[in-house]
Amino acid sequence: MAEGAMTWLPEASSHAMRIDILLAGLVLISLAVLGLVFGLMLLNVLRFRAGRTTDIVRAIAEHKSWWFEISWTSATLVIFFGLFLWATQLYVVAFRPPAGAIQVYVTGKQWMWKIQYPGGQREINALHVPVGRPVQLLLTSEDVIHDFSIPALRIKHDVLPGRYQSLWFTATQTGSFRLYCTQFCGLAHSRMTGTVTVLSAADYAGWLNGTPASGSLAMTGEALFIRSGCSGCHASSRYAPDAADTSRAPSMVGLYGSRVTLADGRAIMADAAFLHDSILDPPRRQAAAFATEMPSFRGVLAEDDLAALVAYLQTLSPALPPVAGN
């Protein structure tokens, strides 16, 4: 559906209808409770208004039953708790992308959205995705807090500087939809908008092939891995095993997707956010088996470089290869 033909906000993603039903249920139940409370207030105003005789008021008060109040209070509590559990389930699912999802890196910067695809294609304030295929967005910011929102897809998430936030969606309609920053981020906040274009599988493949790219993200990350000195400590399958001292630092081979025990005893999944945070804030992500402290690359590598490094490190886990853009 083209944006100009919209008469109402479309349900353009696989989970949009569930979110709409949840919000509609919450509004209807809230209105019902509001109507009940104000209805009872009006009823009591009429029953106990000035002019009623004392005997009638006393008789009404003596016949008062707590069962009615207990019943409607308990019923609304159960309904609201059920909506809470449903909302929790939708929230958890929104951060667990299915296998095979396309990873797209989104970086917020005053006042634009920078998009990077696995194949190395780049865009500003524009996002192209295929219909019917899961897409995982890895979100971060270069400066202040932003908020990435695509109302037609019912996705919205804060974008924090120096951290990866992840969410996913599956578009169900082709067409163009608006994306926004919904967190005030400066004087030009209102101009931080863009367009999401949902294409058929064939059109998306054609768009990828027709969009210039100077090598894939993984290839760029591999060059950064060498140039930044990472290969001097961390082993990689792309190099001779003896090129890195694995007694000082963990091997990158098979790290992505594995569980890592940190120095504080916590076990954590080595996902894209873990790799990103380990580069920027190594002490908080240091593995228990290694005493050597890695220097931070905060302020040394830009978010675009970090995205390329993360994409490359994902290729070093043969069991969990990163998803290609086409």
Image (cartoon, helix red, strand yellow):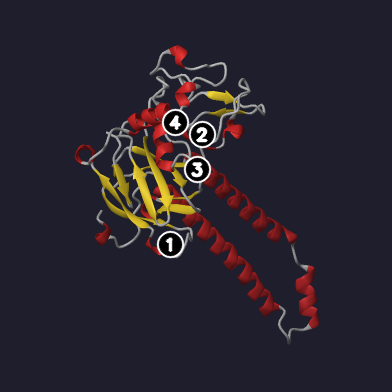
Q: Which residue is mark 1?
A: 189
Mark 2 belongs to which amino acid?
A: Ile
Mark 4 belongs to which amino acid?
A: Ser
Mark 3 belongs to which amino acid?
A: Gly
Residue 299's disc is 3
Q: Are marks 3 and 4 in contact (CB under 8 Å)?
A: no
Q: Are marks 2 and 1 in contact (CB under 8 Å)?
A: no
Mark 1 belongs to which amino acid?
A: His
Q: Which residue is mark 4?
A: 228
Q: CA distance from mark 1 to mark 3?
A: 24 Å
Residue 15 shows in the view: no
| For residue 296, above or below residue 159 | above
- Label 2 crowd bin: few (<14), some (14–19), many (20+), radius 10 Å: some
Q: Nearer the viewer, mark 3 or mark 2?
A: 3
Q: Earlier in the sequence, mark 3 or mark 4?
A: 4
Q: CA distance from mark 2 to mark 1?
A: 29 Å
Q: Taking 268 as reference, is 151 left or right?
A: left
Residue 279's disc is 2
